[in-house]
Amino acid sequence: MKVLLVGNRESQVDALADTLQRADYDVAVARDFDQAMSLIRENPYDAAIIDVLVPEVNGIQIYRALKKASPEARAIFISGYMKTDELGDLAASEKIAFVTKPLRPDAVLDFLNRWKEREQQ
């Protein structure tokens, strides 16, 4: 499963990327909006893990761009304070998950593993 990880907190992003790679996920990392857009244009992704507060924009804008390029992509939004109702119409989607900070890599892996199992059925 190819995963786009978007966040600007270097230590958190690197630790999560390492965890996902050890779990056999193909991970690309973007630290800001421009990097995310470049990666989305260049590659299809099965899922994205997006910090809601990315410099320059919010993570929802990144997800909407991802959906245009990879319509079947799923997303995990990460935030320390955002409520799921702030996701609007996205909150009801089965392709969206929400993980609060402090970030727990096991929670992210749980969502990705469940999605991966569904794809393989």
Image: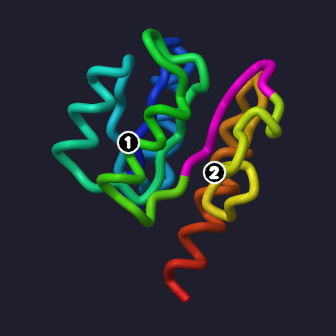
Residue drawn at (59%, 76%) of the image: 117
Numbered disc in front, either 2 or 1? 1
Residue 73 relative to residue 76: left or right: left
> Is the Cβ of the residue at disc 2 closer than 8 Å to that at disc 1?
no
| Image point (37%, 42%), residue name | 65
**CA distance separating discs 2 and 1:** 23 Å
First reached walking from the N terminus: tag 2 or tag 1:
1
Task: Name the element at disc 2.
Answer: helix
For residue 21, the mark is none
Q: Residue at x 70, y 56 (%)?
A: 110
Give the image quarter of residue 72.
bottom left
Image quadrant containing the C terminus: bottom right
* Residue 50: % across, % down: 53, 33
Give the percent coordinates (x, y) of residue 109.
63, 51
Q: According to the image, label 2 marks what residue?
A: 109
- Residue lying at the far front in this picture: please name it: 89
Q: Is residue 53 above or below residue 71?
A: above
Relative to 109, residue 35 above or below: above
Image coords of residue 102 (percent x, y)? 77, 22
Give the residue pinned by disc 1: 65
Magenta-drawn segment: 75-82
| Magenta span dominant secondary structure | strand
